[in-house]
Image (cartoon, rainbow, N blue to C red):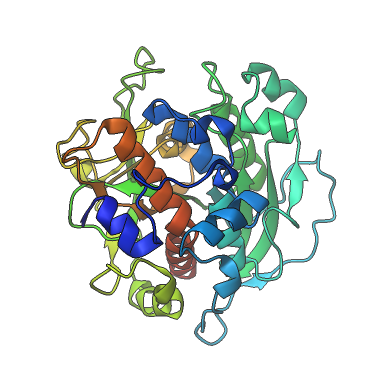
Amino acid sequence: MNVDRKWVERNLGFDPITKPPPPATFATARAAKATQPEDFQREIIDFDSESPAGLQFMAFSTATGLSRYTDVPWPKKLAPKTGPKPSRGSNSPLPRADVLLVTWTVDEGHALSRVLTPGRDSRNDYLSYTHNFAAISKKMRRACPALEANRLGAYWTTAIGGKTVVVFKSDSHMSHDGPQLPNIDVWRQIIREVRPSLVITTGTAGGIGKQFEVGDVIVSPVVRFDCISKFKKQRFAQASYASAPAKATHFATARSLFKANAAQLPKDNTRLLKIIRVAPAALDSSVVTTDFFGFDTSDDHYKLKGLGDVSEMGDAVLGLVVSELGANAPRWLAIRNVSDPQIKADGLTIKQQAAIAAQIYKGFGRWSSVCSAITCWASIVAE
């Protein structure tokens, strides 16, 4: 899929160049007045489809909110079972669990919680997590999401197929925490506390190549850094990491479960969504972690082609942290959905292309995240 402004008009009801969304539809003032592609970075993290700005966006567009979510018809005895309210305080360590599942943006959190902790929403219900916040936050730059939220994240528990799971919505981000990279400290701490046998990082990403449609899911035991900006001098700037391959025994079932909410995805989608299982040695199919707001374009503006299947801004930090744990290291997976496909560059500035990518995320990121949440379920059940 190669999308342009006409695609946005067909699927979201407006031309993002000649009829851009009004300022009231933006989570951040900077994105509403964007002068460069990087201005959309924080918008993607903070955009909340259930906030006043989100409701304004849906009133302006044809996008739909998670009030349209259809409950997934889970196989017998395999439905997620939301845990009780955690008994510990916000400043306590996370509970032990078999699986640690981490997501990142506000709308990813809404979608993941709707699927895997039904009845408990990541924004409204999850318990804030502030353990060692005072120490870790000293490394954070002013106005980053975690400092503004006054916490490292929020969490709840669930059970899937007999496995206990901590579902964690992170407010710490590699892209925004600052040059000291405290996100590394957050990963080390939550893995040490949960002591999982499997860690999953999940959420939205940009598809690299025309073969992907919105909602396709990449399941990768391979991540790589492509740091050519903020962290280009770090030892890990071009490093890659691999874990054991994903178990695909329930992926066919997961694909069939996508159908319950497929009507909320773009009208231009032409097929049943795919789950792409990446092999451990397939570096060119990896999840690519950039230190800049990059996305795939038809003219390969950011030179992402050949680096992997999708790009995002944090998963390789997990690979880096786990690589340091030696014999105690858990298995891990990066499970990313394609929230915005390749952008057609013809006649558009790179800022205009970034605006298109951001608006597609705002229109469909929560719905594509439903697909990756179901894929996380399948990966956990297979353990």
Total marks shown come to 0
Q: Is residue 373 left or right of residue 177?
A: left
Q: Is residue 161 visible?
A: no
Horizontal and vertical percent position of residue 301: 20, 31
Residue at the spot x=81%, y=38% of the render?
A: 91
Q: Residue 323 placed where, x, y %?
A: 42, 33
Furthest residue toward bottom: 76
In the image, 330 versus 374, the foreground residue is 374
- Which residue is depicted at the point 33% across and 58% down? 9
Among all residues in the image, which is located at the extreme front? Answer: 18
Question: Image height check: is 280 above or below 159?
Answer: above
Question: Is 203 or 32 nearer to us in this picture?
Answer: 32
Along the line of sight, the residue nearer the viewer: 2 or 92:
2
Task: Identify the residue at horizontal 62%, vertical 18% (top origin).
Answer: 141
Instruction: Assign the N terminus to one quadrant of the image.
Output: bottom left
Q: Is residue 254 above or below residue 329?
A: below
Residue 28, image quadrant: top right
In this rendering, does residue 24 appear at all? yes
Q: Position of residue 239 (x, y in %)?
A: 31, 27
Residue 142: percent from the left, percent from the top?
65, 19
Q: In which image quadrant can residue 29 be found?
A: top right
